[in-house]
Image: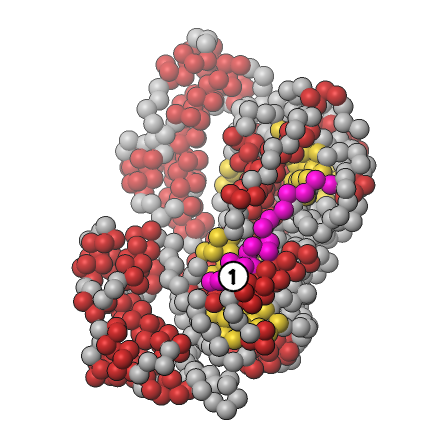
Amino acid sequence: MMDSSTATGRKIHIAILSGMQWAQGRNLVRGALRYCQSSDEAIQLDLLAGVANPTVSQLSNYDGMLTDRTEPGLGKIADTIPVLTVSASHKSPHLQHILSEERESGRIAATTLHDLRPSSYAIFADPRLLDNLAPAAIKDRVEGFQEELLKLGVEKNQIRPFTGSASSRLTEFLQTLPKPTAIFAPSDTFALEIIQTCHLLEIQIPQEAAVLSVGNDRLICSLCQPPLSSIDMRTEEIGYHALETLSRKIRERDPVPWPHKTLVPFPDLRESTGHLSSPNPTLQSALEAIRSSPDQSQLTAAQVARIAGTNLRSLEKLFQQHLHTTIRQKMLEIRLEKVKRLLRTTDLSVDEICERLGWEASALHHIFKRKQGQTATGYRKSLISPSGNALLPKVKTETLVVGFISPLADETGHDMLRGAQDFIRENPDIRLTLLFRSRFPGHAQSSTQLTGGESISRHDGFIATPQADVPAEILGKKPLVYFEHEREHPLNWSVHIDNRAVGEIAANHFLHKGYRHFAYCDYAKEPSPHDGGYIADSRSGDRFGGFRDELLVSGIPASNISRGTWIDDQGLVTWLKTLPKPCGIFAFNDALGLHLMRCCELASLRIPQDLAILGTDNSEFYCNTATPNLSSIDIGFRRAGYRIIEYLVKIIRAEPDYPQAPLRIPVRHVVERESTRGAATDDAAINAALSFIRLRHNGEISIPQIVKVSGISRRSLENRFKSILNRSILDEIQRARLDTAANLLTSTNLSINEIAALSGFKHTRHFCHLFKSQAGCSASQFRKRHFG
């Protein structure tokens, strides 16, 4: 039972059990974090992303739990602590529910697609794509969609649900739908499967098949080509209010009423339903001005620029940068889409359509044939056949198709995919498909089969992340690049992070803070989804080797370097208590760093005063849910994703400059947060000085200012810097400035002059000289080595 002291103002501990594979789980955590940051309450969140089927004993030290998962044992846990779930699958009276408007999302989808006036409607919900969604949520969305369509007067036989999971059946299902059709997918991953299969079948979206989904996972939506329209369930706001409700329940106050009416889902419409979208607000305004113009025949590019609030030259640059076309060409494209929609959905003659849209008939005939390869009349006839299934003419291209095989089970996969998308945007002749295949149960799996059939032949190469299950049928048939593991097969290549450098960066981070005792912590050897599940994983050994060797070279005795392995909590608590204090601990990844911090609390150890903890991967969720926030090494997975697909394309095209040996990607830098702030000392003057330098180093700062903040004399402060940190105050200022410069060099495209100024250097020449003396290479060479 909950201790009565929870009704006081003491810190409460809440576990979050959420799948981070999809936007629903990530947004739920973001909302909970936002509540913690805006509230005066003392709340510590622990993210249990890698825990399956938690037990009562595992959660005995928590005051409550927030979850969107469907584990069967949640009812028993709710007998001991308050559990708030946003899943509709649990019927236990012990659980408190806060539910999304699932049925309403289906109704909104029906209304949106009905406005397109398609010939048929389809529903695709593949049970193999688990997607972390409860079956009840899918069922409610589908039922809401069907009910609303019937209310709108759609005949029941016009609505075709997909049943089954085989890719051959999906192919047949899509081919036999009367076109144009409107497809509803109750999840973004379902929609991605539809769009990728449509590409294989050369079914054009949205002309032949408009696709609308639920979830609004922006990574998945932007990966789809064309970008996917999706219903936003407002999960982040649900997470915010859910944590507020749970916190009040734990503190024995009445839960706040759930604002059902204010959190109605909303459609975020993009090109997959024929709507225009752009992440740039100026560009979005311009596109909306074109689309909504009552007389597009009289609209000029200069008028569009004025409406968008910019000049013509700037707007042309935006169109080229984001849409790879001119304003005039986009205006023409939008006018043609209106013509095609009227040809599909009305009985107006071509001349009547010209009159309605302000076209001269001869001009329309000429432009339509040039752009579509047939006349407007021929286009309309192509929509009609005895079977009702005629397809529009297919556009043949020489596009390379690359498959990205990953369950996207963690932020590493998401960041790599974003990097691959960055490359695709710069290279529009390459198309990326996402194939969900995992070596671990509980992750979503694609229904598209990559076995011996058409799907393999349609791909020119593949990328596989560590957790991916790569079918044997691919091996040796198409170029395949593995990330962070190797397999001995023809046509296989590997790309690795420089893991020894990861360890060296960790060692130097602690050395600069004056630590004399160090520790490294990793997992047991069996691979699991929680630690990344890497095959023949040498990462941990390389990271520890780089960490230890850098410390030894710096004069640290081997007896001052410890190594621990997480097997169970009690063993980790015991190990942490035996470490000499203060000690700097380097964790294999952020998930383990977060767990170490929880065990420190169980052991009554202070962070960072007793143990400073540094993670790896710079995970948004693990680092920010930790209390205090977790410092971490930014590996640069997004840049890795860019480099990997660039590497694969060179292999596919047999370009002469691709590396024959495994590609190694350099790491970036430490992102410092509270878990390693300060120095390895309780000296208040030193810590005050370091804090001031950290805040002011890139602006106007002087040694007298630092001395004043420290509260002691300049000589005393200089002596303490030398004895504790083994450097002067000026050295510390320059080190902070160089660290900032290195971060900017590896994360921005700013010029060297701009970086020097932003880092606190008044003269670029002085910055360049100092940087080269410390880094062993020029700033430009450093950027090329780390940023590509």
Q: Is residue 109 magenta?
A: yes
Q: Is residue 728 above or below residue 66?
A: above
Residue 313's spot in the image, x, y percent? 20, 57
Q: Is residue 103 magenta?
A: yes
Which residue is depicted at the point 54% across and 19% down? 724
| Residue at image point 22% right, 58% down | 304
State left or right for residue 633 relative to residue 532. left
Where disc 1 sits, the SS reads helix
Number of marks in the rendered image? 1
Region rendered in magenta: 95-112
Give the residue at mark 1: 109
Image quadrant where one finds the C terminus: bottom left
Q: Residue at x 69, y 21 (%)?
A: 7
Left or right, 316 with reference to 532: left
**Residue 19 visible from this viewpoint:** yes
Which SS type dominates the magenta stretch? helix
| Residue neighbourhood size for the residue with mark 1, other residues' Cα within 10 Å, grouped as few (<14), some (14–19), many (≥20) | many
Camera sees residue 544 = no
Give how far across and how far down residue 502 sits, in percent.
Answer: 57, 44
Instruction: Kindly identify the amino acid type of the residue bearing the numbered disc 1.
Output: Ala
Q: Residue at x 54, y 51 (%)?
A: 233
Q: Against 481, is 554 above or below? A: above
Q: Taking 390 as reference, is 564 left or right?
A: right
